[in-house]
Amino acid sequence: MTVRLRAGKDAVVVAPDAGGRLSSLTALGVERLLGSESQPEGREADIGWGCFLMAPWVGRLDEGQVPFRGYTRHVPAEHYGHAIHGVLRDTAWRVEHTDTTEVTLTCGLDAARWPFGGWAAQRIALAAGCLTLEAQIVAGDSAMPVSVGWHPWFRRPDDGDLRVGVVADEVLETRDDLIPTGALLPVDDLTDLRATPALGDRSLDHAYVGVRRPVRVVWPDLEMTLDMPANPATVVVHTPPRGVCVEPQTAWPNAPVLHAEGNAGTGLVELAAGERLRSRTVWQWSATDG
């Protein structure tokens, strides 16, 4: 089952059974996302295509640890010994409402994978030249830590290069296994994206912190701006050869662990029972002058 939205030359396909993700985004008549035909095998199968919601945590959790109010709970550490990108990317979502330009979806947070429970909702709305992605994460009968983000896999152009602009002065230091340590590093020749450079052969898998809005993704024929779900925000940029990820999120990867260790500025939110975190990102695009 898929849900198709359309506005002029722009279209979105939502796959409720595949994590409620965008399986396609056509902007000005051209596909901008890696679709299911690009889905990798093995451990990357659920995280390597489309655009999916990350929650109730973003990025990697060190060995699946979730320290919270004096206790450490654990979630399944299925990605090379760590937990990654929340529990929603492979969850079937229920379609609550849809029309030609909008869809709303809901799903529960599986207590076997997220011991705090709770539930989630998405609203995906398309207008000509604009896509709005909204999320709500609602705590169940107990308090819980939470963060939210979106994980798009942008398609590289057939001709020319992709340019990415992230106005941030620092990235998180990581261990060799990409778990953030909590330390901040100034951007350098590799990681500095403030001037929206062409990516070329840059090999990035970095979390930019203190990001000022908006972020830019520029194809030869189109410029897209991504408004952030927080201000300042965290944005992860990952540039493997097959596609480019530019991930707006409300908190750092490994935020529960780093927050418990006393790091300031992680962005982690603590919800009381029944409370909710609302977040959204708005993507707008137009043809480039060229």
Image: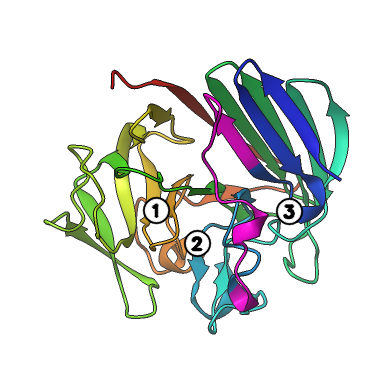
Q: How is the image coloured?
A: rainbow
Q: Amino acid at mark 2?
A: Gly
Crowd class of label 1 (few under 14; some 14 to 19; many from 20; radius 10 Å): many
Measured as percent of width and height from the top left, residue 144 is found at 65, 56
Q: Is mark 2 in CB contact (under 8 Å) with mark 1?
A: yes
At label 3, counting other C-alpha atoms closer than 10 Å, the crowd grade (few under 14, some 14-19, many 20 or more) is many
Could you tell me residue 243's position as x and y percent? 44, 55
What's the distance in space between the residues labelled 2 and 1, CA to CA? 9 Å
SS for dot 1: strand
Name the amino acid, label 3.
Gly
Q: CA distance from mark 1 to mark 3?
A: 20 Å
Element under label 3?
loop
Q: Which residue is mark 1?
A: 236
Which of the 4 image quarters holds residue 49? bottom right
Q: Is residue 160 above or below residue 10?
A: below
Q: Residue at x 28, y 64 (%)?
A: 203
What is the number of the mark on residue 219?
none
Residue found at the far left of this picture: 189
Q: Position of residue 120 (x, y in %)?
A: 75, 45
Q: Residue at x 38, y 73 (%)?
A: 178
Residue identified by numbered label 2 = 59
Q: Which residue is mark 3?
A: 19
Q: Earlier in the sequence, mark 2 or mark 3?
A: 3
Magenta stretch in the rendered image: 24-43
